[in-house]
Image: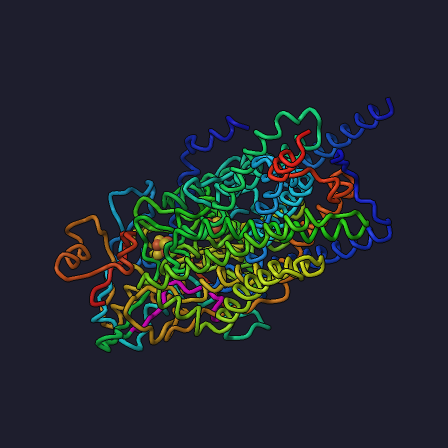
Amino acid sequence: MKDENEAIDEAVDPSRRAFMGVAAGVTAAVVAPGVLLHAVAAAPRSEPVTADVRWGLLIDTAKCVDGCSACVAACDRENGLDMQSKPESQSPLKWDSQKAVWIRKVKLQDNQTGRVTTLPMMCQHCEHPPCVDVCPTGASFKRADGIVMVDRHLCIGCRYCMMACPYKARNFIHEAVHGQLTAVPRGKGCVESCNLCVHRRDFGEESTACVDACAAEGHHAIVFGDLKDPASPISQLLKDMPSRQIREDLSLNTGVRYSGV
Amino acid sequence: MATAVLRASLVAVGLVWTLAVQTVQAEDVKRYVVEGSRAAGLESCVEPTERIRRQHMEFIKHQRIATVHEGIRTEKYSLSGCVDCHISYDQERVPRPINDPDQFCGACHAFAAIDLNCFDCHAAVPNGARLDATAIAAHRAAGVGPLVQSRRDGEDH
Amino acid sequence: MKRIVYREWRIPPARYWSILGILAAVAGTAVLAFGYMEHTGHWVTGMNNSVVWGTPHVFAVFLIIAASGALNIASIGTVFHKPIYKPLGRLSGLLAVALLMGGLLVLVMDLGRPERLIVAMTNYNFSSIFAWNIFLYTGFMVIVIAYLWTMADRQGGPFNRPVGILAFLWRLALTTGTGAIFGFLVARQAYDAAILAPMFVIMSFAYGLAIFMLVLLFAFNDEGRPIGPKVLRRLKNLLGVFVAGVLYFTLVYHLTNLYGAKNDGLEHWLMLSGGIYTFLFWVGWVLIGGLLPLGILYHPELSKERNWIVAACSLVILGGLATLYVIIIGSQAYPIQMFPGQTILESGFFDGVNGQPGPYSPTIPEVLLGLGGVAIALIITVVGVRVLQFLPESLADDVVPVDEETLSEEAFAKPA
Ligand code: SF4
Ligand code: SF4
């Protein structure tokens, strides 16, 4: 058994590799059609992610428009969240509190000045994520590139990570799911949250669904990029404008930053 | 004495049964590869048939760790690769879920009486994002038409 | 003083089997509830993405901390050399194991993916207090079983005290660990308090003892074994001290929260405007779980009556469930303060719009699951006392060993 397992890494003969090339190409076409359409067709990732990059978002609340929820709709579509269906006998109100939401719009008012802000909230991709610390099985983990996500194969659905997250970013799948997207597996009894469109990352796309949608609306309130690259637009912006982390006092060093709150 | 005999015969029965199952499996190779799927036209899977049949779960598990934790998407043992290659389509060109009892994964797992729960979470049909019209045209031109027919919430059909 | 004789619980078979039957029926419905919840998914429960731990967790945590509290009696006997508690040690150990099993079962049956328990057993994340607790719990069972052996077997005698000390320390770690499950959740205001862990310890003392006394009184009553007023007085005084301790810690906990400006929103909500949680806090936690039993236990007349003591124990248990309901569910319902100084006007995800608490109402399957854990614990206890010698023949005053204080008094009174 053992030696056979080792053989997993053994070389493939050329004809098969050729076939796999086709298969991978087709898969890429299915999974990420954008890849084919863009002039620069980035290849799917073949090397492990490294800590040379750290993905993050900067949200400029001054540009975020009250009443717009393009980012939410785009995320729902990209990640198959719009395919969740309410169990027939469930009350709509209760279902609202039980279905998964990766990104949401929040509208705040300052108690003192009365100033109103709207902003999108999602997993903040903490550098020191409490959800990872508490997970008993290690299912909740942080990728080398800073993306915090759940390995569904290990998640036992204890929901301790949901208790620990200060941003209420996590969701438990309360019902059986059908018709999942290839790129976004999802099933009853596990926990999940925003993963910065990890499939897009691995297939070399430039941004996330929410960023694209916000830009398509002409708002450009969300910027995606590499926090570790000083030349990246997001780093440049962070250098120029005042921004902060939500619940800075917890010292989680979040990967999602906000300006204007 | 009686117990020894009993135990020995039980063991024998068990062995014969295991062997029988394996031979049956070996003979029924083609039965599970569904007619009309891409796999039906290929000589073997990404590994020799014997090997993949016995070890596919190990391969997939190995790949799953690489993909989920390291973001590697090019390894050959990907579950979506299995689905792409072994999927078959009905008359309306709608893909049939691969874990259906008469489809590739479903049929063999039903026969081997091994619970198959990959598809509790994973897509059982090739199910990419919904495409806009230009993308569909582009894919048609590239000759990958049927594969991009998404069954997303059934609205495409 | 006579030698303590332990004997199996010999109530008539018809009665024994009907008790078991009732318990098994409760456990059976819990299994059905479990099957239903797992088959359909958790949407049939009241739990949701805002209140993620619900009624099952209230029962589970209650049983787990009560388990370590139940062991207390044995510890007092062995570790602190109070011979009067010695005859009670075996039952105390049995109850500890039984309650822990019941609590853990509830916890496991509520997992989203209980069939992956094997994953939880083979993949550990050692920075998680949850993972550590798995060791604490299994270790506790092993140690208590060893402890029971040292109490019951002549050969084990010499190990009795060392094992007893180990068990005592372990139980403290276990309750602290259980408290720490919540204490580590810095994100939730109600848990952001160092006093939570000692509060859990004192709560475990009270709830464990209350359950122990109920089981003891019921078992003795049913078979007509005598309990003398001395033991009874001792136990009820102890319970009184523990209940007062819980109240004291409650006070300190809420005072620290009140003075910490950061948390006064939470306190205001809980004390005054939290609806069901405010009600459960005042009526359940403070009144039923604290003041009423204290009143009974220290009442000069009532405290001598067995039925009133039973009532006090029951109140402590009910109050305890209410307490944990407030601690576990109330603290989740209170919206997480993500934007201090701001009011949430709209939200796509129940972020506490205008301070609105998260929605939760318990459902029948959840309650059944929780009660099932209680039933399992009691089944283990009932079977245990029936087949093994856990219960002393008599706890009459002339049988129980005298305490060293009284011993020394007597020694002075009539020098032998
Ligand atoms: S925001 Fe929540 S889910 Fe996301 S990394 Fe931080 S703690 Fe984890
Ligand atoms: S619900 Fe899953 S990811 Fe979250 S703590 Fe539990 S096992 Fe880990």
Q: Is residue A103 magenta?
A: yes
Of residues A178 and A153, the one nearer the viewer is A153
**Horizontal and vertical percent position of residue C248:** 47, 57
Q: Residue at x 71, y 46 (%)?
A: C381
Is there any visible trace of residue A197 in the rendered image? no
Q: How many marks?
A: 0
Q: Which residues are magenta?
A: A96-108
Residue B111 rendering spot, x and y as whole percentages: 67, 45
**A203 to A208, vertically: above or below:** above
Quadrant of the image where one finds ligand 1: bottom left
Q: Quadrant of residue A259?
A: bottom left
Coordinates of residue A188 in the picture (x, y in percent): 53, 58
Q: Considering depth in this image, is C51 or A234 the residue closer to the camera?
A: C51
Quadrant into which the C terminus of chain A falls: bottom left
Looking at the picture, does residue B134 appear above or below residue C1?
below
Describe residue B152's horizontal placement relative to residue C8 as left or right.
Answer: left
User: Is residue A106 a member of the stretch shown in magenta?
Assistant: yes
Which residue is outermost to the front? C414
Image quarter of the N terminus of chain A: top right
Depth check, front residue: A153 or C150: C150
State the residue in front, A135 or B77: A135
Give the colouring mode of the picture.
rainbow
Residue at (57% x, 60% y) in the render: C294
